[in-house]
Amino acid sequence: MTSTEKRSPSQQELVKGALLSGVMNAVINGAIQAWLLRGNDVIPLSVDSISAGTPTVLGSAVPLAVSLAMVLTAVAHWTLKGPKKPFFPTTFWLVLKHGLFAFGALVAGAIVWQRVVGTVDVGLVTAVILLGLIAGIISTAVNYMTISEIIMDHP
């Protein structure tokens, strides 16, 4: 390998980068959600209604997770240095796949939560921590899955 060639990141480097991305996104999105939910002392995790008149933690998590999954997939493609697969069709389909997966996973989780546990009210700090954790998990998973899929290995 010459000094001008780029090598693909190792498995350990992928995991480290994904975890770093997850922590940063957890903090940033937790702060954003704290600002958006300010003024609410108590926030339900979920409610037994499709169109709740009040914000819920899991209801706020769905658009957060979907937008993060889709945006971070595209960002991971454009910021990856070295040989990679083309944006279209590879990363384009990953953007759609990750967004739909995040939507389905969170909606299914919220439905099961509501069915099994019911409505549980939490304080603002707990709501923000949960939303930050969801953002961090989504960010970590999306970063790792995207880069693992789009890097091109050269012997």
Image: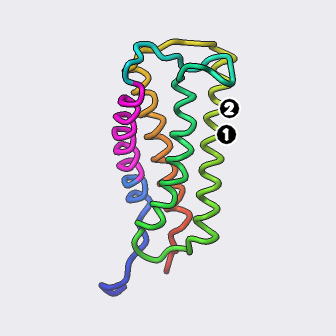
Residue at 53%, 49% in the rendered image: 69
Separation of residues labelled 1 and 2 (CA atoms): 6 Å
Q: Nearer the viewer, residue 6 or 130?
A: 130
Residue at 37%, 53% in the rendered image: 16
Whether label 1 touches label 2, CB < 8 Å: yes
Q: Is residue 107 above or below residue 6?
A: above
Quarter of the view holding residue 85? bottom right
Q: Is residue 36 on the magenta stretch?
A: yes
Q: Nearer the viewer, residue 90 or 7?
A: 90
Residue underneath mark 2: 108
Kind of residue at disc 2: Ala
Q: Is residue 104 left or right of residue 132?
A: right
Locate residue 47, reporting x and y percent: 62, 17
Q: Is residue 109 left or right of residue 39?
A: right
Quarter of the view holding residue 75? bottom left
Q: Nearer the viewer, residue 5 or 57?
A: 57
Point out the stretch of residues depicted in magenta: 18-37
Q: How many marks?
A: 2
Prevailing secondary structure class for the magenta stretch in the rendered image: helix
Locate residue 113, reporting x and y percent: 63, 21
Q: Is residue 119 left or right of residue 36?
A: right
Residue underneath mark 1: 104
Quadrant assignment for the N terminus: bottom left
- The crowd level at tag 2 (other Cα within 10 Å; few <14, some 14-19, many 20+) is few
Q: Is residue 20 above or below residue 94?
A: above
Mark 2 lies on a secondary structure that is helix
Q: Nearer the viewer, residue 43 or 113?
A: 43
Kind of residue at disc 1: Gly
Mark 1 lies on a secondary structure that is helix
Residue at 42%, 52% in the rendered image: 18
